Amino acid sequence: MLKRRVRRVVVSGFLLAVAVTGLTACRTSPSVAAYVGDEQISVSELESAVDDRLAEPEVAAFAEGQEDEFTRRVLGLLVQEEVYDAAAERYDVRVTDAQVRARIDELLGGEDEDDVFGQLAEQGIGRADVLENVRQQLVRREIAEAEGGADALSQQALRARYEEVRETLGQVSFGYITVPDDATAQAVVAQLNADPAAYPALAAQYPGAATTPALESRAPGELPAVLAEGIQAAEPGTAFATPVPEAGGVVVTFVEGVVYPSFEEVRPQLEDEAAQAVEAVGDELIGTVREDLGVTVNPRYGVLEEGRLVPADGGVVDILGDDDPELAAPAE
């Protein structure tokens, strides 16, 4: 269900999935870490890619003590890049640096970029991997659009979805003013019932932690517990009084009624929801490309167990201190 919320960056939204599918058991060479179609990822390329990522102190701190797992992740990312490059070429789509930059800004939603990237680095994800992950997200969308699978992002589809979920987005608009005694409360109730627009002026006369200076909107499940029953029972445009000793007197609550966000207010969320469906279409198409290419990992470096490449014979090989690396290949 679509929920009305303040947009904010979710760090996990940048995280990189590394799984293994489409592996074959042929074409092995001691100097090749993985084959992706006609392309090769050499052991030296893998080692260089690991070193590049470890140049970021936070990433290096993450990798310390789990070097084998980190190397599998890096190889997974390298394989994934090759698959996406092949898919982009097959479907003749291009994603520019400017598009990647714009999408990152959208995902950040005003959050400090250095802070967010720092959090990701602490999870072993370097800046270059973030950029590549976002690029791949956009490639999925572009491929889906190229194949006619992007209808969910059309203006017509977004408006239809808005009408479908509008009732679930309703919030109660209300405000409360804490006054010292019941006589004052009854007078304020009468004033608000006669003139709802007077709320801000009345609230200003009784400032404090238990007074809201202006009306606010909340979902039904987020109403103050002590006032929730009264708010839900009140007619729109009316006020009522509730003795609340812990608040320091009597709370006068004014209920404007249920309000709904406009289409434009929730459009970013509608687009995000639709984009996930579009990306799923793109992901299926990329999966076909992956299968057509064939991904091969040198079996000396691991075995496939339940969709993941793990060390052969339960052993652990330290790629950062050993010439015989342990490798893995990913898929979406």
Image (cartoon, rainbow, N blue to C red):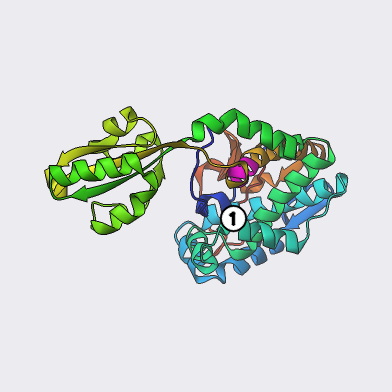
**Type of the residue with mark 1:** Leu
Instruction: Name which residue lies at 50% across and 41% down.
Output: 4
Which residue shows up at 78% across the image and 40% down it? 144
Quadrant position of residue 50? bottom right
Is 229 magenta? The answer is no
Q: Position of residue 256 (x, y in %)?
A: 40, 39
Most foreground residue, 225 or 17:
225
Crowd rating for badge 1 (residues with CA inside 10 Å; few <14, some 14–19, many 20+)? some
- Is 267 a magenta residue? yes
- In this rendering, would 212 be left or right of 30? left
Residue drawn at the location 29% of the way across and 44% of the way down: 191
The residue that mark 1 highlights is 107
Type of secondary structure dominating the magenta stretch: helix
Q: Is 316 placed left or right of 155 in the picture? A: left
Q: Nearer the viewer, residue 143 or 251?
A: 251
- Give the image quarter of residue 321: bottom right
Residue furthest out toward the front: 194
Q: Quadrant of residue 294?
A: top right
Closest to the observer, 64 or 97: 97
Instruction: Answer left or right for 248 relative to 257.
Output: left
- Which region is colored magenta? 266-272
Whether 219 is drawn above or below 40: the answer is: above
Q: Is residue 76 visible?
A: yes
Regarding residue 317, the answer to whether it shows in the image is no
What SS does tag 1 mark? Answer: helix
Residue 303 is situated, as x and y percent measured from the top left of the image, at: 61, 40
Question: Which of the pair 145/287 is nearer the observer?
Answer: 145
Q: Residue at x 82, y 35 (%)?
A: 148
Question: Where is residue 71 drawn, in percent x and y?
Answer: 58, 56
Q: Position of residue 18 (x, y in %)?
A: 60, 46
Counting every numbered tag in the picture gives: 1
